[in-house]
Image (tube, rainbow, N blue to C red):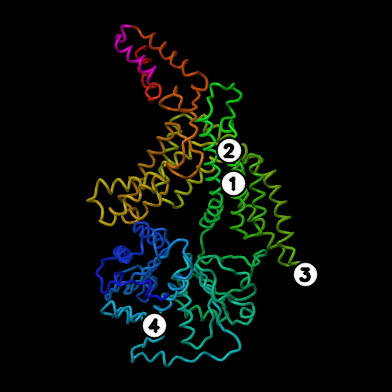
Amino acid sequence: MRVTELLKNASIDLSAHVKDKEDAIVHLVDLMDKGGNLKNKAQYLKDVQAREASGTTGLGDGIATPHAKSSGVAAPGLAAMTIPEGIDFKSMDGNPARLFFAIAAPDGGNDEHLMILSKLATMIMDPDFKEALIKATTKEEFLKLIDDKEDGKFQAPADTSSAAAAPAPAASDHIQILAVTACPTGIAHTFMAAESLEQHAKKRGISIKVETNGSGGAKNVLTADEIAKADGIIVAADKNVAMARFDGKKVVITKVADGINKADELIDRALAGSAPVYHATGGDGGGEAAADVSNESLGRQAYKHLMNGVSHMLPFVVGGGILIALAFLIDGFSVDLNSLPQDERGKFGSITPVAAFFKDTGGAAFGFMLPVLAGFIAMSIADRPGLAAGFVGGALSGANGSGFLGALLAGFLAGWIVNKLKSATESLPDALAGIRPILIYPLCGIFLIGIICTLIIGPPIAVVNEWLITTLSNMDPSAKIFMGLIVGGMMAIDMGGPINKAAYVTGVGLLTQGNYYVMAAVMAGGMVPPLAIAFATMFFKNKFTENEIKSGPTNIVMGLSFITEGAIPFAAADPIHVIPPCALGSAIAGALTMMFECTLMAPHGGIFRQPAYVPRCYLCRCCDWCSCPRYVQETRSEVIKNSQDDIKKVPISAVDSSMRAFLMFSFKYGVKCGICDLLKTIVIALQK
């Protein structure tokens, strides 16, 4: 497959007219759609914008490559656009972008198209080729230039003598510079950084080999012999790569963008030997690790460690929670609680064999939550050696009642302990170094975290948890509503950022303690922003651009699915007018869930979570749609009779006979319509 097979004539626009970066991205997506490469244009646009939000694809030197792997892509493809005068694309070097290639890759596709896309990424790093593409006047000329470049027939303009004057690679018995490049998506930046490093090294007569860690895996892998003989090593990566092989070597560690824009500087640092010596942590083995290159604050580092634990824990919470909810649903449809003795009603959710299977399986998944949370927090801090101590700390937290808070602390402490063990054992003889990851770290780490969890953090946090659960259970209704207001509003402040995650983690933490109210408020608050955006684009079209109106309805599905991030593009475009009303709406939604005493057992799914067990129906306490306390204590007929008796006690002077007849009819036949409590309130008021 050739590059031009992915770039159709309809997907090219030369000397395009766009006003800004956002307009350029939308135009490129339109071109991609015209080429027939998309099955869901809005989804692809969303994924491209999400990729752009994580870091600009304006690579510098006038080149921009907006791209994404997306479920909205039907077939891999390219779209191209030139703007000779350039526009501000927030490029890494601050200069205007003039040549644009949009890249579309399908989720789960094979690796062949990725190799083609990486080939294009390296081709456009040639400055002469880039200028020729920008100056092309017809689409046919544009495509022919690409074909010629791919076939090695491209001829640079005659006045570019610098290439001919470039020095030949220095004779050497080894490769002087080794490099590794990697970016999260592995489509463009990885290969552009590799090409930039190779070109700059070639111009200086320096031999180089670059390993690329793209979507198709590692290519051009460095060998142990090459690493041993290399004069310098560069790792330009924005994701974890195999680092243990560089143990004891001086390694320049930086972000992938520097490989594109600062290639000469990186090569100078590598050859000068000024880079720090990399020391692999015990237990790294051949695994992946990453160095901290951003000088992050302690708070930011703690947040990243916490999110590593939460992200690994969530599949257990989601899967287990939904299975448990289904167990309640099955028993709710299969069993008449009134026919069971009082002591049997406590087994609701595991009365029937099928419900028991779902609840046992979901409970088993729930049992892994705390060990996984603590284990992966510890692993984020101390790499793989911290995993065992963290898992055990999480398990002990579940056993001693300290729960989510205990597991949280256990994870951080386990990582810290293992890091201290690494430092303490560095002076061991080489003959004993091999026992550090397989004996010293797990044995001492588990022993120490066991003592801490059992004797130090376990007892007080268990007391705090018990107090928290009791307080929430007995909390005054107005206080519960206020709590719902707060966590609901937090979900919409930064829509997936630290504040949003803080509220979400709070809900998940209380979920593991058996409190399902806060999670309901969190989910309701998180569903509001995308739904509000969707309805706003429908009812107030004059407030939005044409493209925003087209993408607005997709937020309905995202909102109903509890994907708050659907509102991010709108919030980013106009934060002053979007974030405050969304936060207010989310806060109200969270307060309402508390007022109506809604519960939620799984932390994701939106409306696609099946409703199962409602502890107390706020509007209708005598219906047989749920298992509310009054229905458990009294049969439906008793409720109706008691309600009718209440009506009969109303004096004739207080209400005429027709009103009394209406009330009695409503109690008898309206018990499923949710009005009985309202009517009861009227009766009580009349009695008074």
The residue pinned by badge 2 equals 359
Quadrant for the N terminus, please: bottom left
Foreground: disc 3 or disc 2? 2
Magenta-highlighted residues: 652-669
Above or below: residue 18 compared with residue 261: above
Q: Which mark is residue 369?
A: 1
Q: Would residue 15 be found to the left or right of residue 395 on screen?
A: left
Q: Residues within 10 Å of mark 2 (few under 14, many from 20)?
A: many
* Residue 323 percent location from the top left of the image: 54, 41
Magenta run includes residue 655: yes
The residue pinned by badge 4 equals 149
Q: Amino acid at mark 3?
A: Ala
Q: Earlier in the sequence, mark 1 or mark 3?
A: 1
The residue pinned by badge 3 equals 431
How many numbered circles does the render carry?
4
Q: Residues within 10 Å of mark 4 (few under 14, many from 20)?
A: some
